[in-house]
Image (cartoon, rainbow, N blue to C red):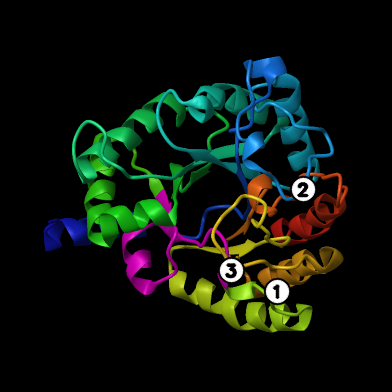
Amino acid sequence: MTTRRTFIAAASAAGLLWGRTHSREVLAFYYGWYGNPKVSGQWAHWPEGATHQPLAGRYDSHDPKTVERIVNQAKSAGITGFIVSWWRRADFQDEGMPQMLTAADKAGLKISIYYEVAKPRQAPGPQATEDDLVDILTRYASHRAWLRAGNKPVVFVYGRAVNELHLSGWAEVISNVNRRFPGGVCFVGDEISAAAAKIFAGIHTYNPTSQTARLSIDEIRSWAQATYPRWVAAAGNRISCVTVIPGYDDTKVNRPGPRPVTNRYGGETYRVLWQEAIAARPDWILITSWNEWHEGSEIEPSQENGDRELIATGQFARNFTAR
């Protein structure tokens, strides 16, 4: 159990980051876990099912031409960076990180990771997670393409990982990582609460579909008008993030029902959420997602929806970052 002194030290270290000097960002959650036989010798993730199909076909995330296409599309649409799903060292996603960083740097895009699981590896509990994060940062965070805030490398932490260690455990992890990694780190946690804002340098939520599911488009707007300002207020003097989705439908991947499906309403859901996100004036706007094809939350061009959401992203993202 972390001591009160450690808890306060971690919160203080996070708070010292912010004089509101960081730039506005539009960041999309990105999944580099897709493979096909032509590039990787076998299928990866595509057999699990997808709500929609990529306009570019079932690509391989390790294909240099695919990665180049994706980062250029994102940059052209006003996206400033990707939050790349990361699970463990030397797996398929980790092996794709160097290529992703190189391509992003060339395109002028920023990269962070989404730390998905805080499970023990060589040691139980926070110590294993601490070692994990220091290893990631040592290998990647000095790259020119890595996202930084307050001159510190940014790492996003998914809600599952937050819950596995609880806020007290993350206070200890953050304190120790900041001690071990020169210059410290900006951690952005997946929990919207005042308590989380005392621990993390920023707070966010990955996916609001549990709250927008089965709502009409007018109800979605009313929800966003009421909720987004509360998210921003909860962050206080930390980095505030608002998440927009084009829709959500994971009914094709055999998950137990009922599923929290958010209707796209022909692209109107995405436009409404963007309008209300900009009105709430957060520091960063997050997009769920660039390419989570299993859950039907992608904005990457699809056979079903074309580049509708990508065009809308370009219209809204530049409006937000120019303010």
**Alpha-carbon distance for marks 1 and 2?**
26 Å
Residue 159 falls left or right of residue 9: right
Number of other residues with Cα within 10 Å of mark 3, as a class: few under 14, some 14 to 19, many 20 or more:
few
Residue under numbered circle 1: 276
Residue under numbered circle 2: 52
Looking at the image, residue 18 lies above or below residue 144: below
Q: Which residues are magenta?
A: 187-210
> Which element is circle 3 on?
loop
Residue 73 falls left or right of residue 149: right
Mark whose residue sits in front, 1 or 3: 3
CB-based contact (under 8 Å), mark 1 and mark 3: no
Question: Which of disc 2 and disc 3 is earlier in sequence?
Answer: 2
Three-letter code, disc 2? His
Q: Looking at the picture, how far across and down is residue 256, in whole percent?
A: 54, 60
Residue 301 falls left or right of residue 9: right
> Which element is circle 1 on?
helix
CB-based contact (under 8 Å), mark 3 and mark 2: no
Is 201 covered by the magenta stretch?
Answer: yes
**Alpha-carbon distance for marks 3 and 2?**
20 Å
In the rendered image, is residue 18 in sight? no
Residue under numbered circle 3: 258
Q: Looking at the picture, how far across and down is residue 247, in whole percent?
A: 71, 62
In the rendered image, is residue 238 in sight? yes
